[in-house]
Image: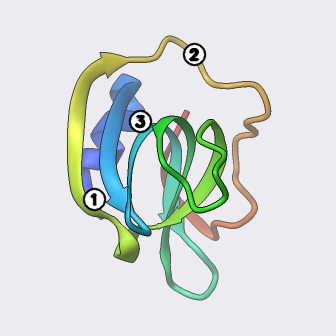
Amino acid sequence: MNTIITSAIRNKQCISFNYDGYQRIIEPHAYGISSKGKELMRGFQTDGGHVSGHTDGWHLFSIEKITFLNLLDTNFSEQRDGYKRGDSTMSTIYAEL
């Protein structure tokens, strides 16, 4: 289990990381395991690149593809619109808003 991600969710802190060749800034909302055993994180991207060209919005990230993960000093105050607790893509949830 990734302590940086769980801490970020618990404290509503933004994180940064590289994913698919793009640096991203994310507000993490849920972290857990899929039914196939993959570690996943659901987060709202506020800055950085994305393969689709859309920078802001909801994304599901495979933890194995994340590199250069950092906890930022930036906090967010509340969950984003469109978030639902109990993310259905995760069979086990370690942390969520």
On the image, the x and y values in percent for residue 8 come to: 33, 35
Amino acid on which disc 2 is placed: Glu
Amino acid on which disc 1 is placed: Asn
Residue beneath disc 3:
9
Residue 26 is labelled as none
Q: Label 3 vs label 2: CA separation?
A: 11 Å
Name the foreground residue: 30 vs 55: 55
On the image, the x and y values in percent for residue 18 come to: 32, 58
Q: Quadrant of residue 67?
A: bottom left
Q: Label 1 vs label 3: CA separation?
A: 11 Å
Q: Label 2 vs label 1: CA separation?
A: 22 Å
Which label's residue is closer to the chain start, 3 or 2? 3
Q: Residue furthest bottom?
A: 36
Q: Is residue 93 left or right of residue 10?
A: right
Q: Is residue 97 left or right of residue 95?
A: right
Q: Secondary structure at mark 3?
A: helix
Residue 2 is labelled as 1
Q: Residue at x 70, y 54 (%)?
A: 87
* Label 1, residues with CA under 10 Å away: few <14, some 14-19, many ≥20: few
On the image, the x and y values in percent for residue 25 come to: 40, 38
Q: Secondary structure at mark 2?
A: loop
On the image, the x and y values in percent for residue 56 come to: 62, 36
Q: Residue at x 64, y 70 (%)?
A: 91
Q: Residue at x 70, y 41 (%)?
A: 85
Q: Is residue 64 left or right of residue 82?
A: left
Q: In the image, is residue 4 above or below residue 51? A: above
Q: Residue furthest right?
A: 82
Q: In the image, is residue 64 above or below residue 67? A: below
Residue beneath disc 2:
78
Looking at the rendering, in which quadrant would you find the C terminus?
top right
